[in-house]
Amino acid sequence: MPNRIWEEIERLKKERGAIILAHSYQPGVIQDIADFVGDSLELSRIAARESAELVIFCGVKFMAETAKLLSPESTVVLAAPDADCSLAACMSGADLREMKRKHPGAEAVMYVNSTIDLKAETWACCTSANSVEVVEAAPSDEVIFGPDRNLGTWVASQTDKTLHIWPGGCHAHSGADIRDLREKMAEWPDAEVLVHPESPSVFLREADEVLGTGGMIRHVEKSRAVKFIIGTEEGMIYRLETLFPDRQFLAAGKIICDDMGYTTPELVLKALESQDCGIQIPAEFAERAEAAVRRMTEIGG
Ligand code: 13P
């Protein structure tokens, strides 16, 4: 990255009271620019705690919306305005209302990778870091879970509650090819295999640990293994290599979210320069969606 852009970003950050948040899937150069790099749950909690004047979010739309819900006084700008999440697009508030009609005794727990209108219909959101805890905390024995089928199936295997699962999925994780993972396991037979719960169940069966991205970092920190095969979006490899230069990491396959790759230093600079008011939450959803994400930040993980 040219020095000029780096210096300009640093200068504008101070001038505008801004913080830059980046998800661990972001390109390496963006992780280097950010004030905080983390998983969905950590970034939500940081946004709520910091209450910065301006939050530049480097990630995808639902993450910036979550930051805005938790920090309504902040201006939250998504650095790459077109970065969306195919998983969030899989289910709407109307879909959840229909499921509630079919399962009247069940509370709804929705993955934070979801739209605002869906969040507004939800008892609590969860991330991959606290999905089991949130489902356990729900005040009903039956729980409607969405939009991710793989995560829901995994959560169902970790709890005695009955889950009614919406059949959505992340195109990057769902599209991963198990033959790639098996090839890597043959290449690095002594490596630990860490897999994100958005992956298909055939991946989870091969895994030593099923973990969200924050959980992967905490696991590597305490593990004695030197080599790790990582079953999640490839940006995570940079994050792990930065944090643990004495360990080795191999991607389990081609798990790539194009939208996560949209952010560039130039877009971060443009977001800092812009005077627009950033993410706006429609008033009809704001209060209920905020309650669902606030509950998420308060439970486990
Ligand atoms: P984390 O909950 O591990 O941050 O994962 C976020 C995500 O979007 C996975 O695709």
Image: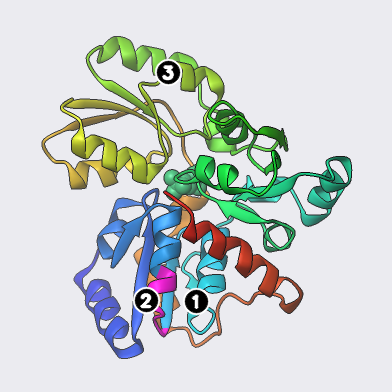
What's the amino acid at mark 1?
Ser
Magenta highlight on residue 48: yes
Q: Tell me, yes or no, whether the two marked residues, 3 and 1, touch with CB atoms within 8 Å.
A: no
How many residues crowd around disc 2 within 10 Å: few (fewer than 14), some, or many (20 or more)? few
Q: Tell me, yes or no, whether the two marked residues, 3 and 2, touch with CB atoms within 8 Å.
A: no
Q: Residue at x 52, y 17 (%)?
A: 202
The Cα atoms of the two marked residues, 3 and 2, are separated by: 41 Å
Question: What percent of the width, then of the height, locates residue 218?
Answer: 27, 42
- Determine which residue is flagged by label 3: 180
How many residues crowd around disc 1 within 10 Å: few (fewer than 14), some, or many (20 or more)? many
Nearer the observer: mark 3 or 1; the answer is 1
Question: As drawn, is 223 to the left or to the right of 131?
Answer: left
Confirm whether residue 44 shows in the render.
Answer: yes
- Disc 2 element: helix
Which quarter of the image is occupied by the N terminus? bottom left
Q: From which residue to which does the magenta span run?
A: 47-53
Q: Tell me, yes or no, whether the two marked residues, 1 and 2, touch with CB atoms within 8 Å.
A: yes
Magenta highlight on residue 211: no
Residue 71 — which label?
1
> In this orientation, which residue lies closer to the viewer: 27 or 143?
143
Picture layout, residue 79 above or below residue 10 = above
Question: What percent of the width, then of the height, locates residue 233?
Answer: 43, 39
Residue 50 — which label?
2
